[in-house]
Amino acid sequence: MRQMVEYRKISIKKELADAVEKLIGVNQEYGYRSIAAFLEDAARRRIEEIKYMNNTVRGPGFRNKK
């Protein structure tokens, strides 16, 4: 049995949503089917980037130091 995925709603500026919608419309080869799919991927990539920076540039556990 598949586990239910929970979702939350977020708000973004119309200008950004329009830009993303246009981008995915003219670049269909990247496989984004919706604004939500694009933003989910962008957020996931940014999270990974920040985790990487925290563990390399600043050293492991940087955020936990006081």
Image (tube, rainbow, N blue to C red):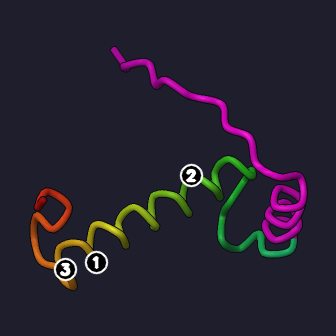
In this rendering, would 47 be left or right of 25?
left
Quadrant for residue 41, please give it: bottom right
Q: Quadrant of the N terminus?
A: top left
Residues rendered magenta in the picture:
1-25
> Of callouts 1 and 2, which one flags the residue occurring earlier in the amino acid sequence?
2
Mark 3 in CB contact with mark 1 (< 8 angstroms)? yes
**Residue underneath mark 3:** 58
Q: Is residue 2 above or below residue 28?
A: above
Question: Given this view, does label 3 or label 2 mark the residue nearer the observer?
Answer: 3
Which three-letter amino acid code belongs to the residue tagged 1?
A: Met
Residue drawn at (65%, 58%), measured in percent from left and top?
Answer: 38
Which three-letter amino acid code belongs to the residue tagged 3?
A: Arg
Q: Is residue 54 above or below residue 2?
A: below
**Residue underneath mark 2:** 40
Residue drawn at (24%, 72%), measured in percent from left and top?
Answer: 54
> Of callouts 3 and 2, which one flags the residue occurring earlier in the amino acid sequence?
2
> Could you tell me which secondary element the residue under label 1 belongs to?
helix
> Of callouts 3 and 1, which one flags the residue occurring earlier in the amino acid sequence?
1
Quadrant for residue 51, please give it: bottom left
**Residue underneath mark 1:** 53
Question: Magenta span has 27?
Answer: no
Residue 29, position in %: x, y?
71, 74
Question: Given this view, does label 1 or label 2 mark the residue nearer the observer?
Answer: 1
Residue drawn at (37%, 19%), measured in percent from left and top?
Answer: 3
Residue 47, position in %: x, y?
40, 61
Nearest to the observer: residue 63 or residue 21: 63
In this rendering, would 27 be left or right of 53?
right
